[in-house]
Amino acid sequence: MLTSITIDPAVHALRPDAVVLALVATGLPGGPSDDGSRAALAEATLSLPVTPPEEHPNVIAWREAYRAFGAKPQRTRCSVEALMRRGGLPEVNRLVDLYNVVSVRHVLPVGGEDLSRYRGAARLLRAEGTEPFEVLEAGVPAIDHPSPGEVVWCDDEGVTCRRWNWRQCVRTRITEDTTEALFLLERLAPMTLDALREAGEDLTKRLRDLSPAVRIESRLIGA
């Protein structure tokens, strides 16, 4: 999986500074939010910057990237800005809780995919507009599509995340039953590569603290 992850040249033409740190974790103990993940969420909430999210340099960079492919960042926010605006981080399950904690602590988008539901290689590209994107509408499964030129994450079955890191598909999302996952930590300048690596080390430690059975491999893509 790690060696086959790619960033399409069309994305780098849009943002030459785009770099992804990918982590594959196996032997994960899934499960609902617990005391440990709740404590981490509370601590991360207290560490949120007092200034508005849109004034943080990392968020400014993501807003500029969204505008570059036609999205309106005031309406469609990158994942880390959306989390920072909530005031308190939501409980989802303990794996999602932990990567959300890392996201706001380091102010970068972090996504997670259930590898058992993933099909083929992960790739970041600009959409044609015909790719399927699985969603729930009023609790009912439905198929949506990205806009032409939109930056999306895909696998062989369709779009796994729209508008770079805005909204994840239903099919590959991490659940309480997930035991193997792909985590994608996404960097734009002015965030440094060292800061990106620090975020990866933070997530790695938190995942390994869950169980001695957890195994993690990583790869930097686009640097």
Image: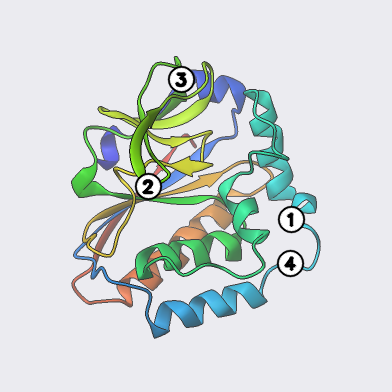
Query: In x, y percent, where is residue 7?
Result: 43, 29
In the image, what residue occupies the spot 58% across and 79% down? 43
Sequence-wise, the earlier of marks 2 and 3 is: 3
Query: In x, y percent, where is residue 198?
Result: 52, 61
Query: In x, y percent, where is residue 194?
Result: 56, 55
Q: Determine contact: label 2, label 4, CB under 8 Å.
A: no
Q: Determine contact: label 3, label 4, CB under 8 Å.
A: no
How is this picture coloured?
rainbow
Q: Determine contact: label 3, label 1, CB under 8 Å.
A: no
Mark 2 vs mark 4, foreground winner is: 2
Work out how far the residue at label 3 is from the one at label 1, CA to CA, in angstroms.
28 Å
In the image, what residue occupies the spot 51% across and 27% down? 151
User: Circle 3 sits on which residue?
Assistant: 127
Q: Determine contact: label 1, label 4, CB under 8 Å.
A: yes
Say what amino acid the circle numbered 4 marks: Pro
Q: Is residue 39 above or below residue 137?
A: below
User: Circle 4 sits on which residue?
Assistant: 49
- Under circle 4, the secondary element is loop
In the image, what residue occupies the spot 22% across and 76% down? 212
Sequence-wise, the earlier of marks 1 and 2 is: 1
In which quadrant of the rendered image does the N terminus lie? top left
- Under circle 1, the secondary element is helix
User: Circle 1 sits on which residue?
Assistant: 53
Residue 6 visible in the picture? no
Work out how far the residue at label 1 is from the one at label 4, CA to CA, in angstroms.
8 Å
- Under circle 3, the secondary element is loop
